[in-house]
Structure formats: C-alpha cells, structure tokens
Amino acid sequence: MTLNLEDYYILLHPALAIVVGFPMLGLIARLAWQTRQRRLKTASGERNAIQTSVGTEHLRLGRWFSSVVVGLSLLGLGNSIFSTMVFKGGFSKEPLRYVLLSFMFLATIVSLILLYQAKPKLWRGIFATLTGMGVIILGSQKEVFRRTNEWYISHYYYGIVLTMLMIFSVAIVPDIYQDRKNRWRNVHIILNTIALVLFIVQASLGARDLLEIPLSWQEAFISGKCDFVLKGCPK
C-alpha cells in the first residue's frame, strides 16, 4: 500500500469529478441540444418528435450540475486548506484562521442553498454574490496552488471561472423564463457553450496536475531536491 490517508483525501476531488461531474455534463449537453432543436422546430411549425419533457429535464439536471460544480470546487480548495490543517500541523500554528475558514466554507454552502430557494431578483443577486465571494476568498488562501505565472493553463483559474458561470446560471434561471425577447436565454446559451469548452480543457489540466502532485511520503524529497526548471532529480 503506497497511499496514505492524506493521498486518498486529495483524490476525492478528481474521483468525484470523473464519476459524477463529467457524466452529468454529457447528459446536460445532449438535453440542451434537444431542447434547442425542439424549440426551433416548434417555432417554425415543423413536425417534432422530441419529447416535451426534455426542457424540464435539462433544467432539473442543470441545477443539480451547478451545485455539483460548486461542491467540487469547494472540495478541491478544501483539499489544499484542510490537508495542511489536519496532516501538516497547520491548526496548531493558526487555530483561529482555520476556524474562520471552516465557517467560510459553511457560509458558502448555506449561501448556495439559499440561492436555489430565492425567488426575487435582488435576493438571487445577493446569494449568488455571497456564494461567489466565498469561493474566491477560499481560493485566495496561501495553501491553494494557483499557478499564477501560467494562469492561462491553470486548473485553479479555469475552475474558478467555471464555478462563477454555474452560480450565474442558477441565478438567472427565472429571468430566462420571464424574458419573452429571449435575451437571457441567449446569454445562457453563449456562456454555457463557453463553459462546455472550458470543462473539456479543465479535464486535461486536472490530469496534468495529478502527475505533478507527489505522494505525501515522497513530497519532502521531491519538493526539496528536484529541480522543476531543469526537470531533474538527484540520482
């Protein structure tokens, strides 16, 4: 057995993304296409064989998927923050800070739940903002590896953008159905098409990052002695 408990904890984020997140993404993309085709055929008066339930299913699964993405984002950030707190003695050095970060995680989750429940536009905006702020504040902690010098190929930055897009998508759902000019619907289509491309890129970036994360018992040797610029380790 080469994995310690810390290593299994780190694997939770990619494992759930593969088992839950990406299968849901495929289903939602298919339902979105069917919903779009049904709407276009209905508007043109063509015969339509696509079931009427595709729109409802797309909405229901899309709302679940948004919460899954936010949850995966929080889990990924939690991997960095709480692995330091639990496995590397961080709590004994900064107990108050980690208590506050724990409350921040809880507040972000509560804000997301309230976002789903909110009906008025003002409250949807407030809870969407609070949820987004929580994710960004947690992501700005020193334990989180952001690859800022290569932000354009950073798993972290792409993940934050996708999380914000999912939060925004949940917040505008009522507006999509109330806007008869379809402006919000077109915004939804454009942003989620961008999100689909980013999810595909994110999968490859996540796989790359897994190659760069050493096992917990190897970290002291690799991080301390290997040269990441020249790509070499002592023989």
Image (cartoon, rainbow, N blue to C red):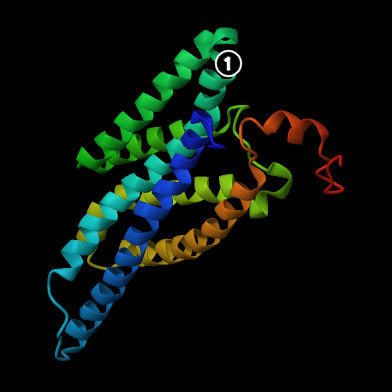
The 10 Å Cα crowd at callout 1, few under 14, some 14 to 19, many 20 or more, is some
Residue on which disc 1 sits: 90
Q: Position of residue 131 (x, y in %)?
A: 39, 35
Q: Is residue 150 left or right of residue 25?
A: right
In the image, residue 50 above or below residue 5: below
Residue that appears at 75% across and 36% down:
222
Q: Position of residue 146 (x, y in %)?
A: 63, 40
Q: Quadrant of residue 39?
A: bottom left
Q: Is residue 70 left or right of residue 206?
A: left
Q: Position of residue 67 (x, y in %)?
A: 32, 45
Element type at marker 1?
helix
Q: Is residue 181 visible?
A: yes
In the foreground, 196 or 171: 196
Q: In the rendered structure, which amino acid carries the disc numbered 1?
A: Gly
Q: Is residue 63 left or right of residue 106?
A: left
Q: Quadrant of residue 28?
A: bottom left
Residue that appears at 21% across and 60% down:
177
Residue that appears at 86% across and 39% down:
234
Q: Is residue 175 visible?
A: no
Q: How many marks?
A: 1
Q: Is residue 217 left or right of residue 226?
A: left
In the foreground, 29 or 228: 228
Q: Which corner quadrant holds the C terminus?
A: top right
